[in-house]
Amino acid sequence: MIARKIADQMGRGSMIRKMFEEGNRLKALYGADQVYDFSLGNPDLEPPRAVQEALCRLVLDKRPGLHSYMSNAGHESVRQAVAARYSRLSGLPVTAGQVCMTVGAAGALNSVLKALLDPGDEVILLAPFFFEYLSYIDNHGGVAVEVPCDRDTLLPDLAAIRQALTPKTKAIIINSPNNPSGVIYPEWLLRALDDLLQKQDHVITVLSDEPYAELAYDGNIVPSTLACLRQVVVCTSWSKTLSLPGERIGCLIVSPRCQESDRLIQAAVYCNRVLGYVNAPALFQRVIEEAIDAKVDISLYEKRRDMLAEVLLAAGFKLQKPQGGLYLFPHSPGDDDVAFAAACARHRVLLVPGSGFHFQGYVRLCFAVKESVIENSVPAFQAIAREYGLKG
Ligand SMILES: Cc1ncc(COP(=O)(O)O)c(C=O)c1O
């Protein structure tokens, strides 16, 4: 009964999901506090107070129509607030007409991909990448073309991207700060990518997936992609910055500098509708409008990043400290990251092999976990280090 393609995809499953299930099995067996789960990217901080207060006010708001349908692009005043924020960040005159509120960043990506792709069109992905991109591209008849990042810096390799371009290349998805590597793409690189794409003889659109854009540490600034790239659609959400992943609230912004930018935003809004999202969640659109400048206390994430990095470095792991995002991405000892992740699970440490992000030889650990999980995991990491002969 189930479509062969879906049955096949379900059979393969995602590595994160497999770790999640293994985690549940181990927790049932040993107790939750005896399992060190770094596998899921679920922010563990509660939303900021400004969000909670806005929500309380709005729930009691007597204005009629709070829960009604609205324009498929979202409430005008909400889009104005988003546009004003992105104008400030980019220095470009972004207007409400270029913004569409979406069902998370995932909804934004799906709406834009549907708007852009004809069957067989190619979309470049920079490995390591968020594995769901493959499904999103496939959803709309596209073909994913994988281009590995530089293995040392984990930054996109422009020469390799140039080589991968074909007349069928329609789009490229970038993600900075990156899940899983934690790398922030510097301004020079974004501008060089823009140059490269603008030199091609057909339009190639950059989809900038930026749900981690506000999670930058050590005073790092995430360059504005709207400022650095001309043909760009920002796809983002408040899932991570406001700890609202379950509320499914995000947006897409078509740069005013895109070719046919009006047609593109109209197409994305149409796709937002016909994909069955219809519009982004009404109540949370209003929450975003009221709490547009709020964010979680990222110093807590920075502290956990440092704590977990220290534990790993002391145990002898090789690791580049992430500049942003929610993940550490150390080298896996031995080349087989899948076998290494399985060995870690035997020590009740759950992490995701880099292969799950199409980048072997690394593993991903989410540091958005309670500090006690990090503290209690030390003996387990030491035991893993001994098993793999690491020198702490
Ligand atoms: C890189 C990346 N893009 C997109 C998403 C999806 O974000 P959202 O929950 O806002 O749809 C995630 C979620 O973890 C992610 O890590």
Image (cartoon, rainbow, N blue to C red):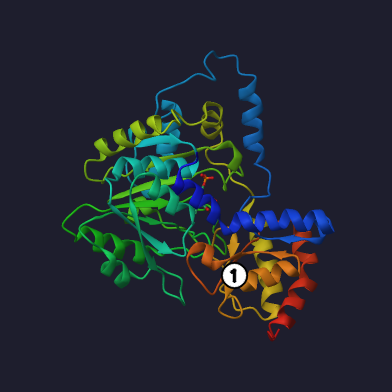
**Above or below 77: residue 122:** below
Measured as percent of width and height from the top left, residue 174 is found at 40, 57
Outermost residue on the left side: it is 201
From the viewer's side, name the closer residue of 65 and 351. Answer: 351
**Above or below 87: residue 313:** below
Q: Which residue is mark 1?
A: 338
Measured as percent of width and height from the top left, residue 364 is found at 59, 65
Query: In the figure, residue 272 lies in which quadrant?
Result: top left
Q: Residue at x 60, y 14 (%)?
A: 62
Measured as percent of width and height from the top left, residue 311 is found at 71, 73
Q: Is residue 343 left or right of residue 178?
A: right
Q: Residue at x 34, y 40 (%)?
A: 94
Outermost residue on the front side: it is 1
Count the marks.
Answer: 1
Under mark 1, the amino acid is Val
From the viewer's side, name the closer residue of 228 and 128. Answer: 128
Measured as percent of width and height from the top left, residue 108 is found at 42, 41
Q: Is residue 181 visible?
A: no
**Above or below 314: residue 346:** above
Circle 1: is it few (<14), some (14-19), or many (20+) Cα within 10 Å? many
Query: In the figure, residue 290 lies in which quadrant?
Result: top right
Query: In the figure, residue 74 lies in which quadrant?
Result: top left
Disc 1 on helix, strand or loop? Answer: helix
Q: Is residue 238 visible?
A: yes
Q: Confirm if mark 1 falls within 8 A of ligand 1.
A: no
From the viewer's side, name the closer residue of 114 and 112. Answer: 114
From the viewer's side, name the closer residue of 227 and 172. Answer: 172
Tell me the quarter of the image containing the C terminus.
bottom right
